[in-house]
Amino acid sequence: MIGLYFSATELLTDGSRVHTFSLIALMNPANYSTDGILSALNPGNFRFIAYIALFVGFAIKIPMFPFHTWLPDAHVEAPTPISVILAGVLLKMGTYGILRISFPIFPDITRQLMWYIGLFGMINIVYGALVALAQKDFKKMIAYSSISHMGYVLLGMASLTTIGINGAVFQMFNHGTITAMLFLIVGVIYDRAHTRGINDFGGLASQMPIYTGFVTVAFFAAIGLPGMSGFVSETFIFLGSFSSNGIRIYH
């Protein structure tokens, strides 16, 4: 970010130019100097290294495979309200940063790496879902499902299509509401039973029928059942992803 600051300038109203952190100014190639270390006008620039450095930082926050290992432990150790905030808000800062900073400031490198971003998105989707299946702790299961769902966001962003990126942004919002509901549901039984072991519970539907109804809605939303918010965003993501490779599946 400091390299970007010293590589670009912004025109002020008095006609002078000053270095800037303005994202709008940094998006305009005309504002970069020919000798800036992160200027596309400089043949010896370090834009690729800067892009990777920013991307890795955002990827840890998402979290993207293989930088995902902190998330399950964080959720297990955190109380329910913190888990809700972490899953509902903070994870989105990673994908937002890529979409708001990396893509518009480094469009040339984004084009070069879009296939790899989509590949890591697919790894997140499949790997996160498979590991979630093996969990015996409710919170860890939801945490790994979050990794899978954030993979959809990466995939939609990598499509570089209007419908794909719209689906990715929508998925960021939907994942926040769905996962927050899931963690609140786990918090309800943990406060009463002081355990989160999946194998420690059985027959809850007969004892807590209203609670079971909420659980059913939350789980169906998480798996993307048609009629639920998760289905809409994931559909947009897939439409954008397939159309970005020249496959026309809608008109």
Image (tube, rainbow, N blue to C red):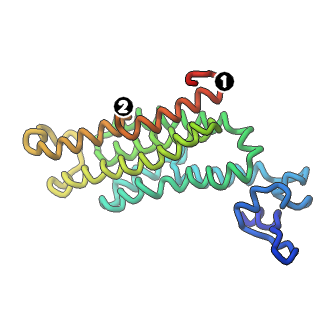
The residue sitting at 42% across, 46% down in the picture is: 174
Element assignment for label 2: loop
Horizontal and vertical percent position of residue 5: 77, 66
The residue sitting at 45% across, 49% down in the picture is: 173
Quick check: can you spot residue 152?
A: yes
Horizontal and vertical percent position of residue 55: 64, 50
The residue sitting at 59% across, 41% down in the picture is: 157
The residue sitting at 23% across, 42% down in the picture is: 215
Front residue of 67 and 63: 63
Marks 1 and 2 sit apart, C-alpha to C-alpha, by 26 Å
* Disc 1 and disc 2 in contact, CB within 8 angstroms: no
Q: Residues within 10 Å of mark 2 (few under 14, many from 20)?
A: few
**What amino acid does circle 1 point to?**
Gly
Element assignment for label 1: loop
Horizontal and vertical percent position of residue 22: 71, 66
Residue with the mark numbered 2: 226
Q: Residues within 10 Å of mark 1 (few under 14, many from 20)?
A: few
* In this picture, residue 107 sits left or right of residue 85: right
In the orientation shown, which residue stands out farthest toward the left? 207
Mark sitting on residue 188: none
* In this picture, residue 197 sits left or right of residue 175: left
* In this picture, residue 150 sits left or right of residue 2: left
Horizontal and vertical percent position of residue 90: 47, 58
* In this picture, residue 161 sits left or right of residue 204: right
**Which is nearer the N-term, disc 1 or disc 2?**
2
In the orientation shown, which residue stands out farthest toward the bottom? 14
Residue with the mark numbered 1: 246
In the orientation shown, which residue stands out farthest toward the front? 251
Q: Is residue 38 above or below residue 136?
A: below
Q: Is residue 5 above or below residue 224?
A: below
**What amino acid does circle 2 point to?**
Pro
